[in-house]
Amino acid sequence: MGKRMFDAGEHAWPEEAPFRTPVFVVTHEKRAPWERPGGTTFHFVNDGIEAALNRAREAAGDRDVRIAGGGETILEYLNACLIDEFSIALSPVLFGSGIRLFEGVDASRVALELVGAEPSPRVTHLTYAVRER
């Protein structure tokens, strides 16, 4: 998880954070782990995205690892070709600000292949496989 997403949720999430698993926050800040009721512990990783991913893989064992935003964090993982597949929930709501997810993608290294689309009246879920060019 990126630091901005963590910062936005730290005060907004309920006491029992919704993840119920270890969460590794990519940050430059040194901070002790923050344990929440219900099984969520936030670990703060300040030595890069690969270190955070390695720690998440170790904690996950044979389960999938999910990378959460913000946009800058996802962009870093995407450009480093460290994402196999991702999903986007597309909803017709205009926020007016934020970080554009694909702005800054290195298209000379990264290609996207649509593998699924599930439309509904309020949201369309898109799933892409990430391939190296």
Image (tube, rainbow, N blue to C red):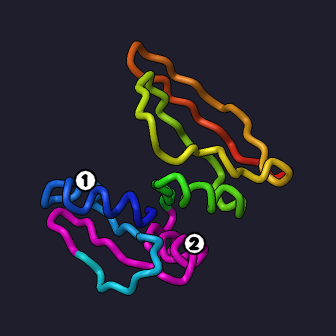
The residue under label 2 is 49
Point 28% across, 57% down: residue: 9
Q: Position of residue 36 (x, y in %)?
A: 18, 69
Vertical placement of 115 versus 98: above or below? above
**Is 126 on the left or on the right of 42, as rendered?**
right
The residue under label 1 is 18
Q: Position of residue 54 (x, y in %)?
A: 56, 75
Check disc 1 and report its element: helix, strand or loop: loop
**Is 49 on the left or on the right of 36, as rendered?**
right
In reply to whether residue 110 is colored magenta, the answer given is no
Q: Looking at numbered disc 1 in the image, what kind of residue is underneath it?
A: Pro
Vertical placement of 87 versus 121: above or below? below
Label 2 packing within 10 angstroms: few (<14), some (14-19), many (20+): many
Q: Position of residue 130 (x, y in %)?
A: 71, 47
Point 68% across, 32% down: residue: 114
Closest to the observer: 113 or 94?
Answer: 94
Q: What quarter of the picture does the N terminus occupy?
A: bottom left
Check disc 2 and report its element: helix, strand or loop: helix
Image quadrant assignment for residue 129: top right
Q: Earlier in the sequence, mark 2 or mark 1?
A: 1
- Extent of the magenta region: 35-62
